[in-house]
Amino acid sequence: MCSGTIHTGLLVVSYATYLLLGTIGFWALEKNAEKEQKMAVIQMKEAFLQNFTHLTVAEVEQFVKNLTDAVQRGIYPVGNESQTEVSNWDLSNSFFFVGAVVSTIGYGTLCPKTSAGQIFCVFFASFGIPFNIVFLHRVSKMLSLLCERLGRWLYAKGMKKKKIKFLTLLFFLVMGILVFLCLPSFLFQVVEGWSYSEGVYFAFITLSTIGFGDYVVGKQPDRNYPSYYRTLVAIWIIFGLAWIALLFNLLTTLLEDTEKKIAQDLHKMRKAGKDNEENQKRYQPAGFVSAEEPSLLGSGGDAQKTVSLATHLGDAKQGETTFSL
């Protein structure tokens, strides 16, 4: 027990340290480059506003293209130069990006643009994704142990095993939905201004690592977010992934067991059908002659003897009748 606790503690510390190193690395490599890009976009917008009446169609199209590229890079050209102080690569946003990388969600709304940042991302993800899998496996194991303790407690109260299995699964499902889907969706409704259904949609798409990128936290330029907001969301993602991975594993096991039971039932039905056919053949009445079994009447000379005997018996019967008259 003590050894397992030490291993878990070392894993948590190592995992947190790895994420923090990644956060600092992306912050150092991308922050200044992003600031320069924001300045260039603001200057481009100001030049457009000063000369838009004299621009040609080709120049307007080029401006729209540059503007679209800026938005895709996470740079929203709203406000003035003071907006450049709000960075997508501060420590909180960098930590959120690191969590999205190791969890393989990949929203696509924020990504490194410098060559050094891209190379760093390759190496960080190469080791971070397996590290994340190990960490999630340990968290899932801890959740399973919690359910097992609940099951043992219910068993000590005299409850039947089938009922215990159902109740522990129900507890795991309801608590997970409440903690990782319902409550966070309410928070997203308040902070992001989304509807509750949009919050539920974002939570599930994120935790299932689908990551469409149509909804992303902390990306609306007209809202002020707490500095720790995206860090908390990243922590929610990490532990939520452990819960939903265990849930998918349980559902997969349930489907496989159901499939095996159906296959066994079908096999039993086929076997019972074959046994019934054999029993019908075995206990068939002796006087019943099937068209497919002429051998029961005999063949060749035996058949002729049978016909002759029948004729003789008929003649004898007719003689008896004549004598009696």
Image (cartoon, grey):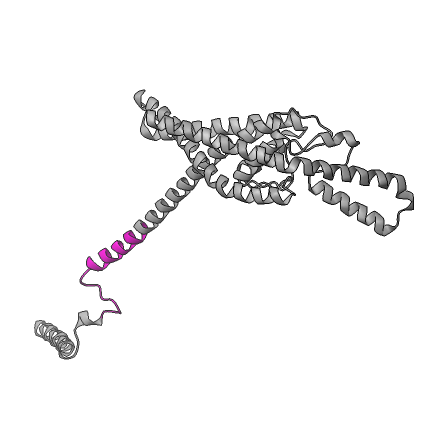
Q: Position of residue 320 (x, y in %)?
A: 9, 72
Position of residue 100 relative to residue 287, above or below, is: above
Q: In the image, 268: left or right of 129?
A: left
What residue is drawn where x is 49% and y is 29%? Answer: 176
Q: In the image, 80: left or right of 32?
A: right
What residue is drawn where x is 80% and y is 49%? Answer: 62
Q: Position of residue 305 (x, y in %)?
A: 12, 77
Q: Is residue 201 something that shows in the picture? A: no
The answer to whether residue 30 is magenta is: no
What residue is drawn where x is 47% and y is 32%? Answer: 15
Nearest the viewer among 243 and 8 is: 8
Q: Is residue 61 something that shows in the picture? A: yes
Q: Position of residue 71 (x, y in %)?
A: 72, 40
Position of residue 39 relative to residue 309, above or below, is: above
Q: Position of residue 259 (x, y in %)?
A: 39, 46
What residue is drawn where x is 73% and y is 39%? Answer: 37
- In the image, the segment drawn in magenta is 269-293
